Image (cartoon, rainbow, N blue to C red):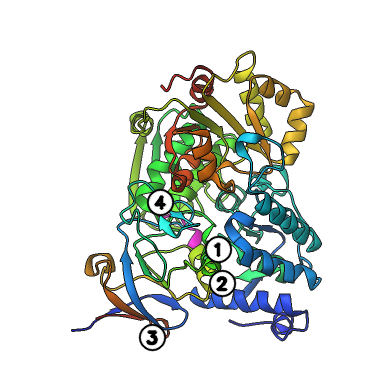
């Protein structure tokens, strides 16, 4: 990799040990992908909680913070693995909770805004067309690349922190023009009625095409999808397909036409999606026979508009005995939803609200499932019904209103 | 007879170990119990098998940034795999492997999922972008 004077100084240790370690790490990753240079970034979104980084990760973060290293660009943090509350059904380990609190202190020392959100693109920062960022959550990455036309790879673990500290990232993958061209054509001839339909569409395209460098181009979408629809589509494509970018003709900024989105190349495959294909996704899920079950609205965290919809659907109803309903959102949306009365309506209906977390990354989730004897997990998020499976839930995707009905009746339909 | 397989990209030290061959994509978040190191996803082709000390042979990577930290964490817990051999991967796996100083490769000129079975001894030589099968 070619390094400029500033990067050489970092590598030389002139900006401290933490920055030196960070750029060394970035160079190794860059080498794997034959990156020729670094690109400066304007924003970093770091990903790290005690559940995934463990004691080794916490020690590393503590060392960096104690050395006094600071982020070189404005930075935010992704969703956390625990909700700091007295909610008995979802309690983390006491020891791990202490560590998570300690980790948050280290992040703040490094000037990271601990927004604890996986929807930074809806509530914190919206990069512009062509802007390079380093974001560490797949749902945020695919939204940045696709909807904003900004440029980022999946920046995981130490990678997002390294980018925050050096203010740059190796130029490979979606920072490069040629990688951003569409290569799968998707003709959508289906009425997209619910956020879950967009997630189902993501599963249809993502699951059989698992490839980070696959870039689907959606055509046939004749209405302007709201941001929440694009969020569920992106999160699902990233989850099932490990994909980091899509184009939608007439909707996303690099797709004025399918030909332009594909850079004049022919697609390597063409997929057609009908109403029946979307319905077949729902029909393929099977319930297991069980008394206690959970309905989850999470993965990604709920936007203010999703909170409003859920408040409307739950108003005047209550969560059925033996059912649990959980919503997760970030601190910013929660406080607005509280002010607007949505939180009170939802709590009155018996819904549990968690702030600053995402459900599937909760610390000791397998034990939480066992303690609560939950068997089926029903959600309108195609992403979460995929990501949570290591914890041995039986997962079922349903449309939003059906999820609320299931939560309030216990009828597993 | 030794079979040599060329890979497209590779990083890390040379290692020899036993393969654990998976038929489908892998994510340490979706598929692995990171307390025990055992594949826990219901229906995964390696369900119930420990990844500890194994060279994981995986056709594709699945979503999820968890791998960025997870391999380093598994290393600290003493249950990390020895190396990662992918057909197709995403950068998370590379970032996670570099942090854990774990050899990682991508692409193969012969389909290793077909060629190998779990328990076969293989050597990963990242410098020469080569995997040898004893």
Q: Residue at x 49, y 42 (%)?
A: A383
Q: Which numbered disc covers residue B99?
A: 2
In which quadrant of the rendered view does residue A394 lie? top left
**Which residue carries the number 4 mark?**
B40
Depth order, front residue of A294/A161:
A294
In which quadrant of the rendered view does residue B48 lie? bottom left
Depth order, front residue of A84/A68:
A84
Tell me whether circle 1 and circle 2 mark residues in contact (CB < 8 Å): yes
Measured from the top left, where is residue A411 in percent x and y? 44, 19
Q: Which chain contains the residue that carries disc 2?
A: B
- Give the distance between the C-alpha atoms of the residues marked 4 and 1, in whole angstroms: 19 Å
- Chain part drawn in magenta: A175-183
Q: Is residue A294 left or right of residue A152?
A: left
Determine the secondary structure under disc 3: helix
Measured from the top left, where is residue B103 in percent x and y? 45, 76
Q: Which chain contains the residue that carries disc 3?
A: B
- Give the distance between the C-alpha atoms of the residues marked 1 and 2, in whole angstroms: 8 Å
Q: Does B31 lie within the magenta span?
A: no
**Which residue carries the number 3 mark?**
B128
Q: Which numbered disc covers residue B68?
A: 1
């Amino acid at each position: 990799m070619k390094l400029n004077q500033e990067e050489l100084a970092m590598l030389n240790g002139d900006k401290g040990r933490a920055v030196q370690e960070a750029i060394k790490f970035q160079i190794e990753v860059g080498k794997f992908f034959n990156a020729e240079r670094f690109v400066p970034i304007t924003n970093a979104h770091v990903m790290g909680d005690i559940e995934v980084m463990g004691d080794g990760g916490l020690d590393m973060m503590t060392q960096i913070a104690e050395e006094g290293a600071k982020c070189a660009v404005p930075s935010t943090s992704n969703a956390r693995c625990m909700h700091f509350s007295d909610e008995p059904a979802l309690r983390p380990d006491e020891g791990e909770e202490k560590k998570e609190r300690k980790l948050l202190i280290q992040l703040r020392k490094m000037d990271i805004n601990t927004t604890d959100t996986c929807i930074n693109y809806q509530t914190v920062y919206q990069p512009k067309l062509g802007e390079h960022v380093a974001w560490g959550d797949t749902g945020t990455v695919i939204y940045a690349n696709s909807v904003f036309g900004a440029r980022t790879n999946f920046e995981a673990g130490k990678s997002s922190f390294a980018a925050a500290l050096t203010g740059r990232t190796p130029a490979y993958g979606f920072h490069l023009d040629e990688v951003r061209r569409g290569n799968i054509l998707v003709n959508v001839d289906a009425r997209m009625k619910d956020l879950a339909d967009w997630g189902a569409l993501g599963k249809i395209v993502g699951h059989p095409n698992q490839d980070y460098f696959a870039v689907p181009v959606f055509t046939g979408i004749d209405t302007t999808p709201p941001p929440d629809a694009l969020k569920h589509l992106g999160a699902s494509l990233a989850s099932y397909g490990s994909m980091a970018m899509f184009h939608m003709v007439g909707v996303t900024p690099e797709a004025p036409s399918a030909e332009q989105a594909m850079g004049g190349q022919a697609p390597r495959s063409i997929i057609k999606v009908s109403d029946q294909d979307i319905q077949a996704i729902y029909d393929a899920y099977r319930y297991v026979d069980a008394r206690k079950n959970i309905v989850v609205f999470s993965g990604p965290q709920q936007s203010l508009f999703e909170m409003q919809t859920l408040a409307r659907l739950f108003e005047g109803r209550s969560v059925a005995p033996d059912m649990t309903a959980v919503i997760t959102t970030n601190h910013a949306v929660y406080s607005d939803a509280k002010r607007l009365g949505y939180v009170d309506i939802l709590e009155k209906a018996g819904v549990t609200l968690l702030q600053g977390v995402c459900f599937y990354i909760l610390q000791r989730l397998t034990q939480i499932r066992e303690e609560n004897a939950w068997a089926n997990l029903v959600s309108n998020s195609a992403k979460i019904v995929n990501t949570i499976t290591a914890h041995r839930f039986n997962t079922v995707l349903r449309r939003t209103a059906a999820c609320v009905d299931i939560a309030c009746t216990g009828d597993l339909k | 007879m030794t079979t040599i397989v060329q890979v497209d990209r590779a990083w890390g030290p040379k290692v020899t170990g036993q393969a654990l061959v998976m038929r489908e994509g892998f994510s340490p978040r979706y598929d692995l119990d990171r307390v025990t190191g055992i594949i826990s996803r219901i229906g995964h082709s390696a369900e119930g098998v420990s990844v500890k000390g194994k060279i994981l042979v995986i056709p594709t990577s699945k979503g999820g940034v968890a791998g960025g930290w997870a391999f380093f964490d598994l290393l600290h817990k003493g249950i990390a795999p020895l190396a990662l051999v992918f057909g197709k991967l995403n950068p998370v796996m590379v970032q996670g492997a570099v942090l854990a100083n774990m050899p990682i490769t991508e692409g193969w000129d012969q389909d290793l999922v077909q060629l190998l079975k779990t328990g076969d001894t293989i050597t990963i030589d990242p410098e020469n972008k080569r995997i040898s099968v004893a």
